[in-house]
Structures are given as structure tokens and as C-alpha cells.
Image (spheres, helix red, strand yellow):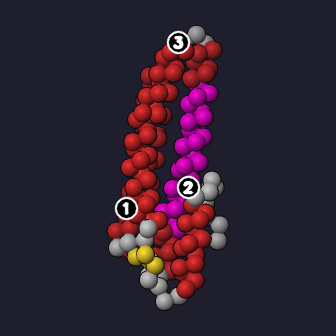
Amino acid sequence: MPHTLVVFLVIAIWMQVKSNRKNADVYNQTHGVVKSNQDLLAVKSAINLSMRLAVIYIILYVLFIIILGIFVARGESLGHAALSLFVFGVVTLPIGLVGKRYEKKIKTMQVQADDPEIADKFQQYLKQWDKARFQLSD
């Protein structure tokens, strides 16, 4: 069971790091300002990655619970399974909170584009990001 916990933790941490890096790269590339369609596409890419990884994380979490249930059904300790789930949550929670900081940078970007459609599209992306989906719809 400890090996399973380590595998799931590594996957969850890798996903969050990947999302954080993408958000930071987009923010740094644009200097926190959306000025063009190219900037908007970069933001869209970061949001899509964040949304996809969030869905995958939920699937990963459910899969982890199922696997722990199988271990318990096969005679492993319910206490160990509960402890594994607790450790998973304790380790991934702060990493997720750091991720929220990176997401907030994207969500608070300014739009300084000549084309008003860019600002409208950016706002649409932010509204969609708050909903459970696999990616943005155009």
C-alpha cells in the first residue's frame, strides 16, 4: 500500500507542478497583460491545461480510493488505508493551494487590447474556468 501512495502522490504532484509552470510561463511571457490574440491563446492554453489536470486529479483520487478499497477487501488494514488517504490529502492540499496562487495571477491579468473581442473572450474563459469541464469552449 505505501508504494501505491507514493505513485499517486508523484503523479498528483507532477500534474500540479506542470500546471503551475504553465501558468507562470504564460504570466511571465505576457507580463501579466493580454494585448493580442497570441496572448489570449497562451492564456487559453494554460486554462485548458489547468482544467484537464483538475479532471484527471479527480479521476486519480477516485481511483486511489477504489484501489485502497480493494486492498482493504483483500485483508489490508482499514486504518492503513485511511492513513494513506489522509497523507495523500495532506501532501496534495498545500500543493493545490500554491497552484491557486498561480491561477489567481492568470485570473487577475489585465486586458489592454485594441480589439474589444479579446477582453470579452478573456472574460468568457474566466467564467468557464470556474465550472467543471475538460476544456474551454470557444
Residue appearing at x 57%, y 46% in the figure: 56
Q: Amino acid at mark 1?
A: Ala
Real-space Cα separation, disc 3 to disc 1, in angstroms: 41 Å
Residue appearing at x 40%, y 63% in the figure: 105
Q: Is residue 66 magenta?
A: yes
Quadrant in the rendering for residue 78: top right
Disc number at residue 77?
3
Q: Which residues are magenta?
A: 44-67
Disc number at residue 35?
none
Real-space Cα separation, disc 2 to disc 1, in angstroms: 16 Å
Which of the two discs, 2 and 1, labels the residue nearer the N terminus? 1
* Secondary structure under the numbered disc 1 in the rendered image: helix
* Secondary structure under the numbered disc 2 in the rendered image: helix
Q: Is residue 68 magenta?
A: no
Callouts 3 and 1 close, C-beta under 8 Å = no
Side (left or right) of 48 relative to 26: right
Query: Looking at the image, which is closer to me, 71 or 124?
Result: 124
Disc 1 marks which residue?
A: 24
Q: Amino acid at mark 3?
A: Ser
Q: Amino acid at mark 2?
A: Met
* Place of residue 51 in the rendered image (x, y in percent of width and height, measured from the top left): 56, 55
* Secondary structure under the numbered disc 3 in the rendered image: loop
Q: Residue furthest bottom?
A: 114
Query: Looking at the image, which is closer to me, 68 or 89?
Result: 89
Disc 2 marks which residue?
A: 51
Quadrant in the rendering for residue 102: bottom left
* Place of residue 26 in the rendered image (x, y in percent of width and height, measured from the top left): 41, 67
Q: Is residue 88 above or below residue 130?
A: above
Q: Quadrant of the C terminus?
A: bottom right
* Place of residue 25 in the rendered image (x, y in percent of width and height, measured from the top left): 37, 64
Which of the two discs, 3 and 1, labels the residue nearer the N terminus? 1
